[in-house]
Amino acid sequence: MSATVEDDENPPLQNAKLFGLFKNPDPGFTQTGISMFTNFVLTNMFVYGVTGRAKLAYALSMISIPCSVIISVRDSQKDYDKWKEMRLLRLKGVPERFMPYKCKYDWSDYDLRKIREEK
């Protein structure tokens, strides 16, 4: 069984897109979505449990959504910056355990897709 080489004649398969919204999501996208949903539910349960007021619980839960998204996106951006700093070390063949930083996500596929979209 041979692996298919991706080039101009054999482009990679395109995933089905939801109205073109999630064309090239970064690797932290799923964690951001899970974090947003979890924060909403836990904030809603906590505030409703303490106060017993459903409208207040819903309002505060809605406020927690932008906070969790901003924190997750900022974390992903810092991780991507660290990954870009270590690009030269990866090209030299330094093993992962000797890298100065530990990255949460693998950004290599993201960079390749980003370069393909620019063409």
Image (cartoon, rainbow, N blue to C red):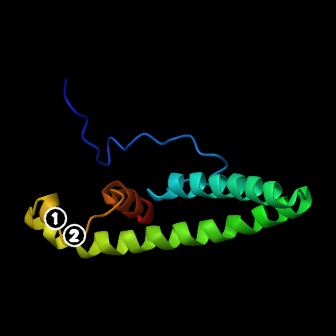
Helix or strand or loop: what does disc 1 sit on? Answer: helix
User: Who is closer to the viewer here, 46 or 109?
Assistant: 46
Which residue is identified by label 1? Answer: 90
Q: Are marks 1 and 2 in contact (CB under 8 Å)?
A: yes
Q: Residue sitting at 75 percent across and 52 percent down?
A: 45
Mark 2, other Cα within 10 Å: few <14 / some 14–19 / many ≥20: few
Looking at the rendering, in which quadrant would you find the N terminus? top left
Residue 64 in percent (x, y) is at: 70, 66
When asked about the image quadrant of residue 44, the answer is bottom right
State the CA–CA distance, disc 1 to disc 2. 5 Å
**Amino acid on which disc 2 is placed:** Arg
Looking at the image, residue 73 lies above or below residue 14 = below
**Amino acid on which disc 1 is placed:** Arg
Q: Residue sitting at 43 percent across and 39 percent down?
A: 13
User: Who is closer to the viewer here, 31 or 1?
Assistant: 31
Residue 47 in percent (x, y) is at: 78, 60
Which residue is identified by label 2? Answer: 87
Residue 98 in percent (x, y) is at: 12, 65
User: Who is closer to the viewer here, 27 or 20?
Assistant: 27
